[in-house]
Amino acid sequence: MSATPQKNRATRRVLAAVAGLTTAGALVAAMPAGAQDRGSGHGHPSRTVDVQLLSFNDLHGNLEPPAGSAGTVSETQADGTVKSVPAGGVEYLATSLRTARQGNPYSVTAAGGDMVGASPLLSGLFHDEPTIEALNGLDLDVTAVGNHEFDEGATELARLQNGGCHPVEGCYEKGKKFKGADFPYLAANVTEEKTGKPVLKPYTVWKKNGVKIGFIGVTLEGTPNIVTANGVKGLKFHDEIETVNKYAKELDRKGVKSIVALIHEGGAPASTSYNYDCDSPGAGDGISGPIVDIAKGITPKVDALVTGHTHQAYVCTVPDPSGKPRMVTSASSFGKVYTDTTLTYDRRTKDIVRTSVKSANHVVSRDQAKAADMTALIARWNALAAPIAGRPQGFISADINGRGSTAPEKPLGNLIADAQLEGLAPADKGGAVVAFMNPGGIRSDLVYAASGGEGDGVVTYGEAFTVQPFTNMMNVVDLTGAQLVTALQQQVSGSNAASPKILQVSKGLTYTLDLTKSGAERVVADTIRLNGEAIDPAKTYRVAMNEFLAGGGDGFAALGQGTNKLVGASDLDLFNAYLAAHSTADAPLAPPATDRITIVQ
């Protein structure tokens, strides 16, 4: 999911710490794979062998079970009702994967990107070293990069791959040097502008007893639009289809005929239930979005697609360019789901028998045993984070939903925008009259129930960090009324037409969003009001937003046209200051009303 990326996070985090001393389920094959050679009865290996492919995506450093609605998956019951199932947490993901591997001697585990970035404090505070360590422990064999792997730039991504202590903060544990990932990160479509060479390996080949499967990894071509300019500086992102086809041909020439593409781009199934059949009534009929066209364009040499980015769970077949069905899967997000796919490998042709491919998504349920090694890992890092993580910031009277809200206007989005406006409204802080927050930058909910020993209703620094983990600096800029209106229209037009990105707005800005219309017309221009007054196209307004939006991120080119920029405090600092100023134990903050955007549908 697109989100506000992080820039110069290390320095800011150290300063913040000194100043102030967060899909559903394990995926198991639809039919048990057996994953052994199908014997001939004469002691010889059979012609085919079943290979188990376990996959997941968009973990985002969620080592502990995600809180609130962000930690559940939807499951459609036999009677058609939908049940919410608590899921996720690496202690359970490890158990799910280890259980699924039992009886499957040919088993490979792959991921679809965004393993790190936008992470809860437990991982984010330590530049995601805890997550890489956990993934090593999960026996991950390979992952594609996602857009969030570039939040801190290519140099930091290389450190996560190769190891070494952080260049600014050093080693976090005395006598221990960070070892890096013992699995390859693949970035086939990301090259250095100067040399034209891939920044990381484009592909890898998994081998066992003569069985060979090639994995090609790509992130979405539009990564620069959803990551700060600093994160992608000096890099070029190429077309997903052309890149995968190029390297599939190269693998084929090397005798690797079985190929899986790991693609950090996805789709939207017609149902959010992880067990929805998106091949009903026909192959791929129940899914839409960018991955559909990508799947239709990728060479038939590729046997299956593991995808991600949209945080949805689906197992679909989408026709390849020759018209034959091909498996396309995604496993929700945050380690709540895993996919179990059976790939039948033909030893004679060295290829996958595509007609035999079976796949299913499974919930990583929390009613199974925890993996002891993951429990120990979490406890170790939590002890290091505790002095900062447990510090109280404010008080709430009920859950305030952000990531867990499916509505265009989210209670937590309003709270964040109000905090930004209040912090930047004083003349010497920027003189802002309105604030905008991008929805993808809200990474969690604020949950009333205690996450540790702090007590119900207490918002800790760790919980606030989990909501806004990017530590983006706030900007206040001059925009004309005409540019403001255009920015609001860009929520539902241009690159956001198919999948709208509704900005969260501060108190005082109101308008009507008419979803019965199309494109820019969905924002009813003559209803836009600021403190009751119509927007004057010729007038100049001081507008607050994070540096990601101020750079035109998420398709908001109009917001990138601001002038007279003043750089303020970080988004997290303003959020925490607002919580402190507006809540006490006796007078906690209530969820704000969602009455700023009038929806017509």
Image: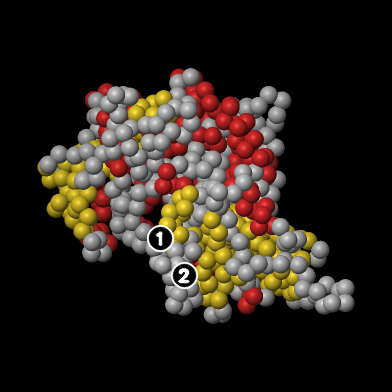
- Closer to the camera: disc 2 or disc 1? 1
State whether residue 441 is above or below residue 73.
above
- Viewer-nearest residue: 238 or 271: 271
Mark 1 = which residue? 82
Check disc 2: other Cα within 10 Å, few if <14, some if 14-19, many if 20+: many
Left or right for 4, reference 565: right
Residue at 39% x, 41% y: name it: 445
Measured as percent of width and height from the top left, residue 159 is found at 64, 39
What residue is at 63 percent from the left and 59 percent from the top? 54
Position of residue 386 relative to residue 5, above or below, is above
User: Residue sitting at 39 percent across and 38 percent down?
Assistant: 447
Rendering coords of residue 65 (x, y %): 52, 43
Q: Quadrant of residue 20?
A: top left
Residue behind mark 2:
278
Residue 302 or residue 576, whichever sits in front = 576
The residue that appears at 48% across and 31% down in the rendered structure is: 452
Q: Position of residue 418 (x, y in %)?
A: 27, 35
The amino acid type of the residue labelled 1 equals: Val
Q: CA distance from mark 2 to mark 1?
A: 16 Å
Q: Secondary structure at mark 2?
A: loop
Q: Secondary structure at mark 1?
A: strand
The reply to whether residue 376 is in sight is: yes
Could you say which is closer to the camera, residue 250 or residue 111?
111
Q: Position of residue 387 (x, y in %)?
A: 52, 23
